[in-house]
Each structure stands twice: as structure tokens, then as C-alpha cells.
Image: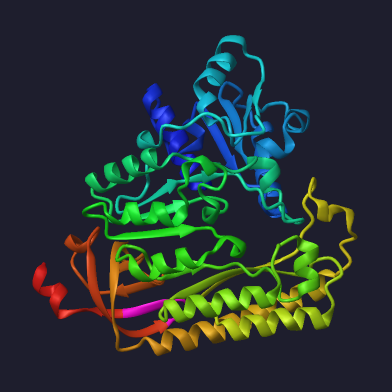
């Protein structure tokens, strides 16, 4: 979501007549588009901003956007008086007006609305990738997990109209994009804030699938509560929809899940996973897991470990708990020692690597569809992405970049497959 917001901001500034530079010493305007989901991300931004304040160049404009802007608001000005403006996640449309104020008055300016009310110019986004594009379909979150700042930094859920989404998708396909990722803090909630539409996420997917020339559709992220049988059926039935679902568990203990306010039990979660695997046998599942949540016992961690072993996720994003100011979890003592968090985290990492290796070995010898993105860093191979969100390296010509090719999987290293371009693909070059 932040990547897309950055592309939209870049598009606004380009229309204003500004040009981008990769050399920050030459920049007249520096914007930090921030994330607050982890404490480390905030500390990195504060450190970098502090360093800029100690430098001699004072005639440039410095702004802070993103979740940190909403979370900290005026506190940023208090700690970093050289920052010129603060722009919240729901105020990107105000960027030009805010810049005008700063330039004309020289005073600090701030916009941090609690709700998203003004639609953005997504078509004008300055996209970095030429074959894959992000499309926002819903902003905000209504789930209020006790550890998460997102509902407070991005506000309540607001679905974008189906017409505007479909229009943007058609425009992207006309520009040559092969893959679209639908974005939201919880895409599965799409349309639930607009009951009068009688139009939910699976309805949108069926319409997007009809767009001629669109090869792939992905979506992230999901909340298990809102993953419906209808959505699973869409993954099974729609040719464009990739067989990959981010299905975040967060914890394997019912007591911890309740303390996190996740709104499901592990039994209900397992039932949905089983149904999805039944309907879509080749589905690749991803997860988020937090270890060391306040009061988590050794036995409860073992439940999480066993759940991960049972589901066998293809991708896993594993975190140690860190308190976030403004969340309900802050009222609980962070009572799990960092050494124990680190040990539990490492055990899950080791398990994930073991499972991932097994899953990748099972695919060897098969041919898969690969969207070719670019050359590898050493320039010796092409690098592409499978439908199940794995990278593949293989030999081929530059003319393949931006196309979809068939690749036979011959080996793997860590999270990346090695492959050989299929005969059918070679004949089409």
C-alpha cells in the first residue's frame, strides 16, 4: 500500500512540473513516506530525519507522509523542527495545496484527517514496474487487532467504486501491464461498508477477470474471517486469479488469538484452510505470525509451531512482538524476554525453511508460467515470478522481459527456483 501511495505522490509531483532525482543532495523536496507497523521502521525514519536536521542545507522542503504522520502528528514538529509538512494517509490529495502553503508562508503545515473521503488520481500514478501494477480497492481497517496501529493511522474501511477500479484495470492493461495486485488492509471486506451496492469482493473479481488481455490478478492482504466460500470458488474458477492466498494466522493458541482480537479460533481457521485446499488443491498459502505476544506461554508457542507445521505455508512473514503506542496491547506488560522471543522466532524460521524446501522440491521437473520481470543482478539470467509468487532464474533473451513464458523447474536455492525456458516459449520468440 505504501509503495502505491508513493507512486501516486510521485505522479502528483510530476504533474506539478517537478522531476525526480536519485541524489538527495540535489533535491529541493524530500518526502519520507513512512510505515508504523513496526517500531524499527519508525526509528529508522526518525534517525534519518534527525541527520538531515544537522546538515547545513536548509533551503529544501522536507515532508513526512504515511502512517507515521497520522500516528505522531504534531509530535514530529516538536522533535524535528526542520520538517516543513506532515501529510496523513488520508490526505494525499492535499499535497499540492500543502506545498503551496509551505512555499508562500514558510510556515509548517499539517493535514491528518481520520477518514479517507477524497478519491485519488490513480491513473496518474508514476509506476516503477512496467509489467506489474498495484490497484487500491479498499482503504482502512475495521478489525482493530490489539497489536496493530493501522485502524488508527488509516481510519475505517472505505471501498472504492467498482466502476473506478475496473476503469483503472482496463487502462493498465491497455498500457501493457500483465499482472495486477488488488490492495487493501483487508481486501476481503470489499463492499461490506456499502451494503447498498450488493457487491462484494468475489463479484469484483469476476468482473476483473473479464478484462481482455489481463493475464494475472492477485490480492493482498486478507483477514481469515472474511475469506468466504465464494472467494475460494473464484480462485478455483477464474483463469486470471493466481492460486496464491495470504492467509495470516498470527498465532496458534485460541487464548492468544482472543487476546489479539483476531475474531476466529484456530479450529475455524483450520476449517477454512482445509476447504480452500479442497477447492484449490495447488493453492500456495502465505501467513503472518507474531511470537512473544504478552503472556504467551511455551505451550502456546508450541501450538503456533504445530499449526505452521500442519498448514505448510509457502511464504511466511514472521515477527517478534513489539509494543506500538496507541494500541490496546500497550496496556499489557511486554513480559516475554527478548531472548525467548528471538529463540521462538528462530525456531519458526527454521521450520519455514524446511517446509519451503520440501514444497519447492516437489515442483522440480514441472513447467510453470513465469512473468519475466528483469535481468538478475549479475546479468546472467532472466528473473521472473510464478503464479504462486516464487521467483525463478533462467537463461533467455532480453526480448522476453515483460512477457509471460513457460519455464521448466530444474533446481532451487533458498526461496528461488532455477529453470529452463520451455520449448513452446522458445518457439514464440
Side (left or right) of 158 relative to 401: right
Quarter residue 371 falls in: bottom left
Q: Can the viewer see residue 41 in this picture? A: yes
Side (left or right) of 114 relative to 75: left
* Image spot of residue 383 (x, y percent): 32, 67
Residue found at x 64% / y 35%: 52
Residue found at x 74% / y 78%: 344
Residue found at x 51% / y 47%: 191
* Image spot of residue 141 (x, y percent): 63, 48
Magenta-colored stretch includes residue 417? yes
The front one of 24 and 61 is: 61
* Image spot of residue 13 (x, y percent): 43, 28
Highlighted magenta segment, given as a residue range? 413-418
The front one of 272 and 151 is: 272
Question: Is most of the magenta stretch helix, strand or loop?
Answer: strand
The front one of 217 and 386 is: 217
Q: Where's the C terminus, which quadrant?
A: bottom left
Amino acid at each position: 500500500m505504501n509503495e502505491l501511495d508513493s507512486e501516486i505522490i510521485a505522479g502528483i509531483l510530476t504533474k506539478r512540473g517537478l522531476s525526480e532525482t536519485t541524489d538527495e543532495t540535489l533535491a529541493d523536496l524530500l518526502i519520507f513516506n513512512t510505515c508504523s507497523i513496526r517500531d524499527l521502521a519508525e526509528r529508522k525514519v526518525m534517525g534519518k530525519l534527525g541527520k538531515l536536521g544537522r546538515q547545513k542545507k536548509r533551503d529544501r522542503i522536507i515532508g513526512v507522509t504515511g502512517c507515521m504522520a497520522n500516528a505522531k502528528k504534531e509530535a514530529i514538529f516538536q522533535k524535528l523542527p526542520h520538517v516543513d509538512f506532515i501529510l496523513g494517509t488520508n490526505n494525499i490529495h492535499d499535497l499540492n495545496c500543502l506545498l503551496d502553503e509551505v512555499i508562500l508562508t514558510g510556515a509548517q503545515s499539517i493535514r491528518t484527517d481520520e477518514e479517507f473521503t477524497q478519491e485519488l488520481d490513480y491513473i496518474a500514478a508514476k509506476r516503477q514496474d512496467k509489467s506489474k501494477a498495484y490497484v487500491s480497492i479498499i482503504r482502512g481497517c475495521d478489525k482493530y487487532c490489539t497489536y496493530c496501529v493501522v485502524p488508527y493511522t488509516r481510519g475505517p474501511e472505505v471501498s472504492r467504486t467498482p466502476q473506478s477500479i475496473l476503469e483503472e484495470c482496463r487502462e493498465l492493461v491497455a498500457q501493457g501491464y500483465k499482472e495486477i495486485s488488488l490492495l487493501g488492509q483487508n481486501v476481503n471486506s470489499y463492499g461490506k461498508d456499502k451494503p447498498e451496492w450488493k457487491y462484494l469482493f468475489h463479484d469484483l473479481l469476476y468482473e476483473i477477470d473479464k478484462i481482455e488481455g489481463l493475464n494475472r490478478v492477485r490480492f493482498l492482504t486478507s483477514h481469515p474471517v472474511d475469506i468466504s466460500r465464494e472467494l475460494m470458488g473464484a480462485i478455483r474458477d477464474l483463469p486470471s486469479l493466481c492460486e496464491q492466498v495470504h492467509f495470516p494466522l498470527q498465532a496458534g493458541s485460541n487464548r492468544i488469538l482472543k487476546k489479539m482480537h483476531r475474531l476466529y479460533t484456530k479450529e475455524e481457521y483450520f476449517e477454512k484452510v482445509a476447504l480452500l485446499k479442497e477447492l484449490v488443491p495447488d493453492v500456495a498459502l502465505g501467513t503472518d505470525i507474531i511470537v512473544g505476544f504478552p503472556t504467551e506461554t511455551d505451550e502456546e508457542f508450541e501450538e503456533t509451531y504445530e499449526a505452521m507445521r500442519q498448514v505448510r505455508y509457502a511464504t511466511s512473514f514472521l515477527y517478534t512482538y513489539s509494543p506500538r503506542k496507541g494500541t490496546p496491547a500497550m496496556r499489557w506488560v511486554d513480559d516475554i524476554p527478548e531472548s525467548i522471543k528471538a529463540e521462538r522466532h528462530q525456531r519458526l524460521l527454521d521450520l519455514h525453511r524446511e517446509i519451503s524446501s520440501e514444497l519447492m522440491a516437489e515442483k522440480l521437473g514441472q513447467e510453470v508460467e513465469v512473468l519475466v520481470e528483469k535481468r538478475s543482478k549479475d546479468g546472467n539470467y532472466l528473473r521472473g515470478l510464478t503464479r504462486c509468487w516464487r521467483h525463478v532464474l533462467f537463461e533467455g533473451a532480453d526480448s522476453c522481459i515483460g512477457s509471460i513464458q513457460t519455464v521448466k523447474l530444474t533446481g532451487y536455492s533458498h526461496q528461488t527456483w532455477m529453470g529452463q525456458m520451455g520449448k513452446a516459449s522458445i518457439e514464440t520468440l
